Amino acid sequence: MTIFEKILNKEIPANIVFENEFVLAFKDISPQAKVHVLVIPKTKIESFIQVKSSDASILAELMKGISLTANALELDSNGYRVAFNCGDHGGQTVDYLHAHILGGEKLAAWTK
């Protein structure tokens, strides 16, 4: 069982910033920006690598949940970054699909 499943099951605490019937959003314990929140679907998918066409509705709700969370955090006026880490080379450390919302400050560009 992943740490995210334990958070969903209320087995361990999290600083929850948004929740509905489809997603849960909570503050990252190791923030990489002034605002750093994780958004997870309540239905487990391990990674984008495992996404199937039957997961389309889960992904749609996840995307809506990201937008609703960013709006609740009042990040919409200045913008924010949404990132998904996928697999070992992509930096994914928890085998549970999740989005990172980063904002609250001007972020550095990722281009070289």
Image: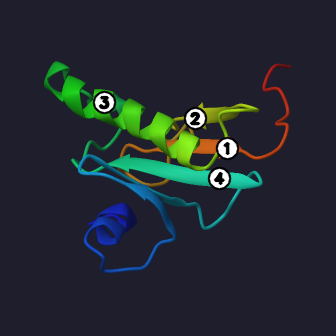
Q: CA distance from mark 3 to mark 2?
A: 14 Å
Q: Which mark is residue 36?
A: 4
In the rendered structure, which amino acid carries the disc numbered 4?
Answer: His
Q: Dot 3 corresponds to which residue?
A: 59
Looking at the picture, how far across and down is residue 38, in whole percent? 51, 52
Label 4 sits on a secondary structure element that is strand
Q: Residue at x 58, y 35 (%)?
A: 83
Whether residues under marks 3 and 2 lie with C-beta atoms below 8 angstroms apart, the answer is no
Q: Are marks 2 and 1 in contact (CB under 8 Å)?
A: yes
Query: Crowding near pointer 3: few (<14 within 10 Å), some, many (20+)?
Result: some
From this view, report whether residue 112 is shown above or below residue 88: above
Q: Which circle's residue, 2 or 1, is located before the other in the chain?
A: 2
| Mark 1 vs 4: CB contact within 8 A | yes
Does residue 8 appear in this view?
Answer: yes
- Quarter of the picture containing the C terminus is top right
Q: Nearer the viewer, mark 2 or mark 4?
A: 4
